[in-house]
Image (cartoon, helix red, strand yellow):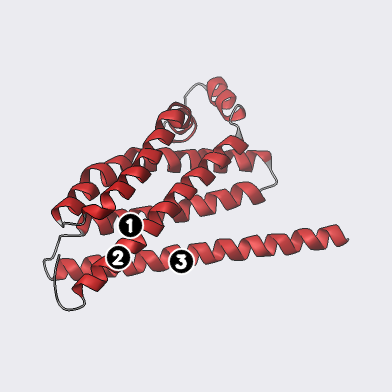
Amino acid sequence: MFEKFRLNKARKKVKKAINDNLISSQESIEQMSKILRDFNGYKYHKHDNFLNLCIFSDVVNIDLTIMLERIRLSERNSEKKLYARVLATVIIDYLENINTLIGRDCLKELTENKMSEFASEFKAINKKFSNFRKENEKQLRDIRNNTIAHKSKNALILTDKIENIDVEEIYNFGMQLQEYSTEFTNLSTKIIYYIVDYMKEGRKL
């Protein structure tokens, strides 16, 4: 009885933390979207790539948070496998886009805006994403392509691939990616404050 009480209490605590994270990410999406729309309304586009990256990352963070929660709370093995397959798809899709969004678009924009003091931190985070992708890309893409996006028409191959999914490993991949995403969020917050402080007096970068 006492053990069940402790378990329920722990679950409620985790659920609250997850809800807080989701609310924070959604608020960030709304705030960044408003800033981007306002800037576009004034035909001011110097921070488009950075703000787009912030919004994109917040959307993915919501996806990660929900999928990680569902994997951890699900009791049915088939349900865990399904969420792991979706999570693998979210991860590989994000990794395929993030290098371009950070490495090509955002770093170029920071340099053009004379904000190169943030470049080294962006490069460090981008390297973590890049290394993570190199180490796990083949496995994640195989799960996405053969069990979700382009499901194999061969039922035996399909069921074998689903059966062989290591749910805990995919869960850990998601946790690792979320850790990197948090690092990016912390850095992007510093940049937002920098932009806001710089523009308080009506100046533009």
Q: Residue at x 26, y 42 (%)?
A: 103
| Secondary structure category for the residue under label 1 | helix
Q: Nearer the viewer, mark 2 or mark 3?
A: 2
Drawn side of residue 31 relative to residue 65, left or right: left
Residue 163, how many percent across, how many down? Answer: 62, 28
Residue 202: image location, x then y, percent: 15, 77
Q: Secondary structure at mark 3?
A: helix
Residue 101 x %, y %: 27, 46
Q: Residue at x 36, y 39 (%)?
A: 127
Among the two numbered marks 1 and 2 on one chain, the one whose residue lies closer to the N terminus: 1
- Three-letter amino acid code at the position of disc 1: Cys
**Residue drawn where x is 42% and y is 52% of the image:** 183
Gap between marks 2 and 3, in whole Å?
16 Å
Q: Amino acid at mark 3?
A: Ser
Residue at screen point 48% across, 38% down: 88
Identify the mark nearer the N-term, 1 or 3: 3
Q: Tell me, yes or no, if residue 60 can be seen here.
A: no
Q: Answer yes or no: do the residues labelled 1 and 2 have beta carbons within 8 Å?
A: yes
As drawn, the label of residue 192 is 2
Query: Which circle marks residue 5 in the picture?
Result: none
Q: CA distance from mark 1 to mark 3?
A: 13 Å
